[in-house]
Amino acid sequence: MLGKVTVKLHTCLRSAAGRDQVELELPSNPSLEHLLETLSSEYPNLKPLLKNPESGYQHLMILVNNQSLGLINDQALAKRIVDGDIVSILEPCAAG
């Protein structure tokens, strides 16, 4: 069974994807990590912004239904996402 999740992209992620939000169809109750991997696969320009080779996803600020997940560690990555959730992702980027 597939579920739909809305992913809102902010800061540099919006520019890299060319849009401010995407709808993903995912298997029932995927983990946040699965969602991030799917997003990277469907939008390859996002991959280097989402996952840092040294620190993984720790630099991201992620909210699920407007609730911050805090530090993006293994526990946060294991969080289950359900049909209808809204996931907002912010990535710090330099501006000048």
Image (cartoon, rainbow, N blue to C red):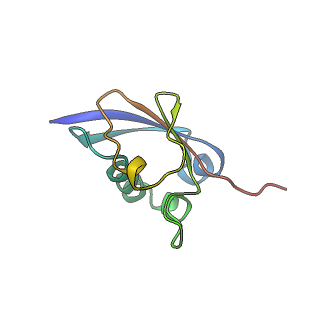
Of all residues, the one furthest to the bottom in this rendering is 54
Q: Position of residue 49 (x, y in %)?
A: 56, 60
Of all residues, the one furthest to the front in this rendering is 75
Q: Is residue 83 above or below residue 29?
A: above
Q: Is residue 77 above or below residue 2?
A: below
Q: Nearer the viewer, residue 70 or 20?
A: 70
In the rendered image, the quadrant that contains the N terminus is top left
Q: Residue visible at 37% across and 59% down?
A: 41
Q: Residue visible at 45% across and 61% down?
A: 44
How many numbered badges does the structure rendering display? 0
Q: Position of residue 7 (x, y in %)?
A: 45, 38
In the rendered image, the quadrant that contains the C terminus is bottom right
In the rendered structure, the answer to whether residue 27 lies left or right of residue 95 reads left
Q: Position of residue 33 (x, y in %)?
A: 36, 53
Q: Is residue 53 above or below residue 9?
A: below
Q: Is residue 49 above or below residue 84?
A: below
Of all residues, the one furthest to the left in this rendering is 1
Q: Nearer the viewer, residue 12 or 34?
A: 34
In the rendered structure, the answer to whether residue 94 lies left or right of residue 63 reads right
Q: Residue visible at 37% across and 46% down?
A: 32
Q: Position of residue 3 (x, y in %)?
A: 25, 33
